[in-house]
Image: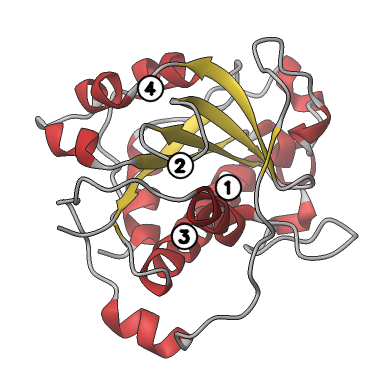
C-alpha cells in the first residue's frame, strides 16, 4: 500500500477547518506545555546507520495487519518516530520535507505494550527527541472502535503512530495551497515510518478509514489539529 495517494484521497473528500485563531500557532509545538504530562520521557538516541539498504526496505515493504504478542522496545518506538519527524540538524530540519520549513505535522504514539513506557497517548517532541504524555491508560481498544469497517485487529499492535496536521501553520504563507502541502508532508512522513519499520524487522501499514472527530478526542488534539494517518506497528505474526 502506498501512503501518499490514500492520504491525498482522504483529504480530498473531507474539507479542512477554516484557519482562524490557530493561524498564529507556533510552528514548533515543542514549546507548548503539557498540563496532563508528567516529566517528558527521553527516548534513546536515534540511529543514523543500519544493516538494511534502502533498496531492500523498499522491496520488502508490505502492509501488515497481524501482529505477534510481543512488545516494542523504547528504542524501536523512538526510531520510528524519528524516521517520520526527527530533527536532523541544529536549524530544525527534519527527516521528512516540509514546505517552507513550517512543520505543520504532529506525531502521537499510542502505546499499549512498549517496554519502559506506561500505556497511554504521547506527543512526540522532535527537538528533544522525547515524549510528553497527554493521556494515561491503554487506548488501543478505544482506537480500534473509532476505525471504520470493523478493524479490531488494530488493538493487536503493541503501538500505533498517528500523524496529524495543523494547516494553519502553512496557510499564512501558502494560502489555499497549504492543504495540499500538509497532505504531501503527511504522506512523506508516513512512508518514512513504514520503511523504518521494515528496517527494524517490524511490520506496519497505513490506515485512513476512521472517525476523525472521535480519534481527535481520543488523542486530546487541540482545535485546528486534524488526524491524517494511523500507522499500527509491531512484530509480524
Of 189 and 7, the residue lying toward us: 189
| Residue at x 43%, y 39% (from the top left corner) | 228
- x and y percent of residue 46 in the render? 65, 62
Gap between marks 3 and 2 measured at Cα:
19 Å
Residue picked out by circle 1:
182
Residue picked out by circle 2:
115
Instruction: Name the secondary structure under disc 3.
Output: helix
Gap between marks 3 and 4 measured at Cα:
20 Å
> Viewer-nearest of labels 3 and 2?
2
> Viewer-nearest of labels 4 and 2?
2
Q: Quadrant of residue 42?
A: top right
Numbered tag placed on residue 193 in the rendering? 3
Asked if the residue under mark 2 is in contact with the one under mark 1, i.e. CB atoms within 8 Å, the reply is no
> Viewer-nearest of labels 3 and 4?
3
Q: Earlier in the sequence, mark 1 or mark 3?
A: 1
Residue picked out by circle 4:
215
Numbered tag placed on residue 7 in the rendering? none
Q: Earlier in the sequence, mark 1 or mark 2?
A: 2
- x and y percent of residue 28 in the render? 79, 38
Whether residue 53 is situated above or below residue 86 in the rendered picture = below
Whether residue 223 is situated above or below residue 212 in the rendered picture = above
Query: Dot 4, crowdedness within 10 Å: few (<14), some or many (≥20)?
Result: many
Amino acid at each position: 500500500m502506498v501512503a501518499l495517494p490514500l492520504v491525498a484521497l482522504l483529504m480530498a473528500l473531507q474539507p479542512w477547518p477554516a484557519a482562524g485563531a490557530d493561524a498564529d500557532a507556533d510552528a514548533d509545538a515543542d514549546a507548548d506545555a503539557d498540563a496532563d504530562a508528567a516529566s517528558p520521557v527521553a527516548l534513546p538516541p536515534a540511529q543514523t546507520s543500519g544493516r538494511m539498504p534502502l533498496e531492500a526496505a523498499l522491496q520488502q515493504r508490505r502492509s501488515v495487519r497481524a501482529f505477534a504478542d510481543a512488545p516494542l522496545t523504547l528504542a524501536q518506538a523512538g526510531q520510528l518516530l524519528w524516521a517520520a519527524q526527527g530533527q536532523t540538524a541544529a536549524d530544525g530540519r527534519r527527516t521528512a520535507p516540509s514546505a517552507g520549513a513550517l512543520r505543520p505535522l504532529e506525531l502521537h504514539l499510542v502505546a499499549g505494550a512498549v517496554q519502559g513506557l506506561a500505556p497511554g497517548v504521547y506527543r512526540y517532541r522532535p527537538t528533544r527527541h522525547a515524549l510528553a504524555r497527554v493521556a494515561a491508560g491503554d487506548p488501543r481498544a478505544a482506537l480500534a472502535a473509532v476505525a471504520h469497517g470493523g478493524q479490531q485487529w488494530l488493538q493487536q499492535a503493541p503501538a500505533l503512530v498517528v500523524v496529524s496536521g495543523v494547516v494553519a501553520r502553512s496557510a499564512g504563507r501558502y494560502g489555499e495551497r497549504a492543504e495540499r502541502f500538509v497532505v504531501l508532508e503527511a504522506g512523506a512522513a508516513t512512508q518514512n515510518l513504514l520503511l523504518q519499520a521494515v528496517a527494524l524487522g517490524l511490520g506496519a501499514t497505513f490506515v485512513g478509514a476512521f472517525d476523525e472527530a472521535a480519534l481527535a478526542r481520543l488523542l486530546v488534539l487541540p482545535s485546528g489539529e486534524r488526524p491524517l494517518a494511523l500507522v499500527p506497528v509491531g512484530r509480524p505474526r
